[in-house]
Image: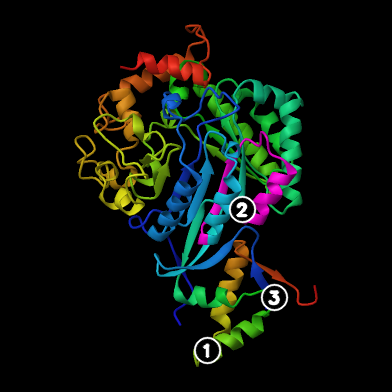
Amino acid sequence: MDGIPRLGHGFRFQWEPAQNCHVLLYPEGMIKLNQSAGEILVRCDGQRDVAAIIANLEAAFSTRDLRPDVETFIAMAVDKRWLRLESATA
Amino acid sequence: MNAPLTHPAPGIGPPMWLLAEVTYRCPLHCVFCYNPVDFARHEQELSTDDWLRVLREGRELGAVQCGFSGGEPLLRDDLEILIAEARQLGYYTNLITSGVGLTEARLDAFKAAGLDHIQLSFQDSTKEINDFLTHTRTFDLKQRVGDMLKARGWPMVMNVVIHRLNIEHIGRIIEMADELGAEYLELANAQYYSWALLNRDQLMPSREQLQCAEEITNEWKARLADRMRILFVVPDYHEGKPKKCMNGWGNVFLTVTPDGTALPCHTARMLPGLSFPNVKDHSLRHVWFESAGFNRYRGTGWMKEPCRSCDDKEKDYGGCRCQAYLLAGDPTAADPVCPKSPHHGQVVAALENAENPVRRMRPLVFREPRESRRLTEEIP
C-alpha cells in the first residue's frame, strides 16, 4: 500500500478523556476507536506514508509483522472516508 | 496490539450533544417550527458569559458535539465568540441556520473561529419553498450561501422539512438541491409538535403522497449516488412505530434554551408536573446527573403497561414523552403512534383525516411572536 494517509474532509481525530479513548468526530456523530486504531490514526499526520507509519508502530511496540493489520485498517478507513490516501508526489 | 477495531458509542454515560438554542428570535415564520408555542414568554436570553460557562461545563461533562440553533442563531451578535470558544474546548461545532442574513464577512469570522460544519435549513413551508421552486429570492439566497460555504471548504448540507404542502414537489426539490451543489440532503418529514401540531391537519400528507415521494426519492438516490447522499426521514405517524426519541431521555442530548432552561429535548418544557433547572442557578453536572427533570424518564423504570412488559422497551424507550402527553394526555403512557397504545386511535384518526380530501378549511398558524402571545393566553 502506497501513499500518505490524511484525515478525511470533515473528520476530526482527538483524545477524549471522558471516553478514555481516541475518537473520530464528524458532523453530528462520533466514532470511538480502540487502542490500535487510535495508535494508527495518531500517526496519520499527513507527513508519514504507510510504510513509515508501520515502521514507527513496530518500533514503538517492539514488534514486527504489523503490516497486514495496519493496511487492513487503513483500507477500511479509506473506504469509510475517515482517511484519504494521497500519493507521495502530489 | 489488538486487531484494529471500532466499537459503537455506549448508551449511557456523559451527554454526547450540547444543543445551544441561543435565541428564539427568527426572521422566518415556519408553520412547522418545533420551538414552543409560547416562545414569546421566554424571550429573555442568556448573556455571552453565561453561554461561555455553559460551553465549558458541557465539555467538562464529556459532550463532544455542540450544535448552535434557535430561532435563527445568526441573530446573536456574539455567535462567533461562542463558536470560537466551543471549538477551542474541543467540541465538533455545528451551526444550523436558514442562511438568512449570512454575509461573507460573518462566514469568514466563523471560519476563523474554527466552525466545523454548517447545515442550511429550509425553514418556511410555503413562501420559501415556493420561492425556491420558482427560482426566485430563496433559490438565489441558498445559491449564494452555498457558494460562500464551498469557497471556504465546508460541504453543502441541506435540510428540507417535507409536508403536505411541498411533498408533491419532492423531485424538483432534490433536483434543485443538486443544482446548488448539495453534497448531503436530508428530507425530514414534519414531526407534529408545537407549531406543526397546531397545523397538523394541513401538513400531514396522505399515505399515497408519502409512498410516491419515497419512490421518487429512491430514483434520485440512485441517479445522484456519486455526488449526493439523500436521507429520507419517514414520519412516525405513518410508520406505526414509536421512535427512540432523542436516543433516550437524558441519554445523549442536553439542550439549553435561550433563557437558560436545560432540557432533555427541545420540546420537553411542555410536559406537566416537571420542572427543569436553569443553567443560571445550577451547574450542567447537576443538571445532567442530579436534576429531577433529567432523571424523570431515564431508562425504563418509569414505564407502565403496555411498555413495561414490551420486548421493544429498550429499543424505543416507549417512544416520545411529549407525543404521549400531547395525544394521550399522559407523559407516562406509551407513545400513541404504537399500535399497542390504547390511544392509538387518535393517530389512526389523524391519518384517516389526511386521506380525506374534503377537510375542514382552516388557515395555517404562522410562528410569530403575535400568534405566540395569543395562543399563550389561551393556555391556562
Q: Residue at x 73, y 45 (%)?
A: B105
For label 2, the residue is B115
Q: Are marks 1 and 3 on the same chain?
A: yes
Question: In the image, B340: left or right of B138?
Answer: left
- Residue B59 is labelled as none
Q: Residue at x 42, y 42 (%)?
A: B256
Q: Quadrant of the C terminus of chain B?
A: top left
**Does residue B61 appear in this view?**
yes
Mark 1 and mark 3: Cα distance apart in space: 19 Å
Mark 2 and mark 3: Cα distance apart in space: 26 Å
Q: Residue at x 43, y 38 (%)?
A: B257
For label 1, the residue is A60
| Chain under disc 1 | A
Mark 3 residue type:
Ile
Compared with residue B379, is residue B330 higher up or lower down, i.e. above or below? below
Q: Which residues are magenta?
A: B89-114
Compared with residue B152, is residue A11 higher up or lower down, i.e. above or below? below
How was the colour assigned to the protein in this rendering? rainbow
For label 3, the residue is A4
Mark 1 residue type:
Ala
Residue B354 coordinates in the image, percent (x, y): 47, 17
